[in-house]
Amino acid sequence: MKDFTEAYAMKLDREDPLGALREEFSIQNKSLIYLDGNSLGMLVKDAAEDVQEEVEHAWGVQLIRSWNQGWYEKGLVLGDKIAKIAGASDGEIAVADSTSVNLYKLAYAALRLKHGRRKIITDDLNFPSDIYILKGLAASLGGGHEVVILESADGMTIAPEQVREAIDGDTALVSFSHVVFKSAFMYDMERVTAMAHEHGALTLWDLSHSIGSVPVELNRAGADLAVGCTYKYLNGGPGSPAFLYVRKDLQDQLTSPLQGWFGEENPFDFGLEYRPAKGIRRFLAGTPPILSMVPVERTLEMMIGAGIHQIREKSIALSEYLVGLVVHELTTLGFSVGVPVDVKRRGSHVSLKHPEAYRICKALIDPAVGNREVIPDFREPDHIRLGITPLYTRFIDLYHAVQELKHIVEYKLYENYSSQRDAVT
Ligand SMILES: *Cc1c(COP(=O)(O)O)cnc(C)c1O
C-alpha cells in the first residue's frame, strides 16, 4: 500500500462488496469508532426487535407453552447454524453455558476417555481463563495430571516444532486458542490436530477469537472438541451463552461431568437414574438463557448469507491496510505491530504495542480528545488491541483511528491520564 490518504480509505469503502452490512447495525453515535467488536460485538437492529418480540410474545403471551414452540431446541438450532461457519455438521454443535464452563466439561470428558495419560498441553498465549480451568481440573482429579504450558519465544507465536516436541504417548489433551487473544496468532488447526492424533491425543480448540472472522474448518481439520464465544464476532450481547463442538463419532464415547437434566435422555421422565442423551445434547446441563440466545441468530444468518470466506477476505484487506498505515504513520512514535506479519497466521484483530498503551487508550476513548471517540481495548502490559469486525468496520474508521493515535502521542495528550487501571479494561 502506498496511498495513505483519507480519500483512498473512502475509495476502499466504496468498493467493499460487504459495505452495506453495516446498515444492519444500530449505530447511535455516528462519530464513534468502535474497534472492540472482538470483545463485545455491536447490536444488530433486527436482533433488538427479536428480543422485544421474544419478551412480549413468546414469554409475555405464550408463557410456558414456548418451551414446545422452539425454546427447547433453540441451543441445537443455533448450533447447526454455527456449524455452517465452523466447518462442522448438523448435530455437532450446541449453544449452552459459558466458554469457561464448556471448556471444563469437554476437557474433563477428554481426560476421562484418555484415562491413564497424564499430560495436558497448552501455551502461554492462551486466554488465562482457559489455563485456570485446565489447571483447576487437573488439581480436582487428584494431581496426577500435568498442565504443560508451551512458552512463546517472541511473545506472539508458537512454532509448530514446539508443539510437535511436546506431544507424546502420555499426552491426553492438546488445548489451544485457535486465534490467540493478544497477538492474533492463528494456529494451523489441521496440522496440530494431526500431530495430536499421531500420538493418540485429543484436541480441544477455543474458537472465541476466530468464529465469525476466519473460516474455521473443524471437520476438515479432524478436530475432536471445541468451544467458543457468541458475544464477540457473533454479536450475541453481554453474557450470551457460548457453544461447544464434539465430533460426531466421539459424542457417545464422552460424558459430561455436569450430569444435569438437560443432558438426560428424557428429562421429562423425571427418572432418578441419569442416562446421558444420545448425541450432542448430553453435553448440556441445565435450562438455557433463552433471551440471551436470541440475538445471535441474526448475525449467523448474515454471515451465512455473506459467506465466511468473503468475510475473511474483507478482514484481511482491513488488517493489511491498518498494519500498512501503522508502519507508515506510527512507528516513529514508539508504536510497534504486535501481530504476525503473515496474514495466514493471523486472525482479525491487530494489536499495537506502546510503553504508554494504557494511557493512550484512556485518551482515545475520551470524547474531549481529538475529533472522534475511538474505542479499542487495552491488554496488559502494553497492548492496544484494535478489533476488526468485517461486518461493520470500515477502512475510514481505521484511517481515523490511526490519525487519533498519532495526535495523542505527538502532543503527549496521554500524560493527562492516570495509569491506575479500571476494573474492566
Ligand atoms: C472471550 C474468551 C473467553 C470467555 O470466556 P467466558 O467463560 O465466556 O467468559 C474464553 N476464552 C477465550 C479464548 C476468549 O477469548
Image (cartoon, helix red, strand yellow):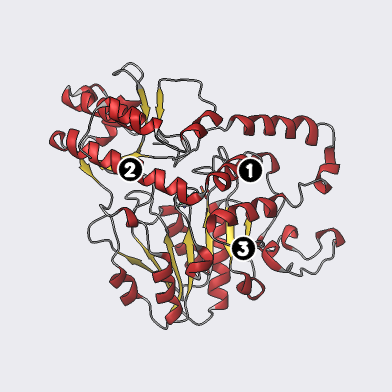
- x and y percent of residue 268 in the render? 85, 58
Residue occupying image coordinates x 84% and y 37%? 63
- x and y percent of residue 58 in the render? 79, 36
As shown in the figure, which amino acid type bears the numbered disc 3? Answer: Ser
The tag earlier along the polypeptide, 1 or 2, is 1
Q: Is residue 411 left or right of residue 373?
A: left
Q: Which mark is residue 297?
A: 1
The tag earlier along the polypeptide, 1 or 3, is 3
Residue indicated by mark 3: 89
As shown in the figure, which amino acid type bears the numbered disc 1? Answer: Glu
Label 1 secondary element: helix
Residue indicated by mark 2: 319
As rendered, which of 152 and 410 lies closer to the eye? 410
As shown in the figure, which amino acid type bears the numbered disc 2? Answer: Ser
Picture quadrant of residue 385: top left
Q: Relative to 160, does residue 348 appear above or below in the rendering?
A: above
Distance (Cα) linking label 3 and label 2: 30 Å
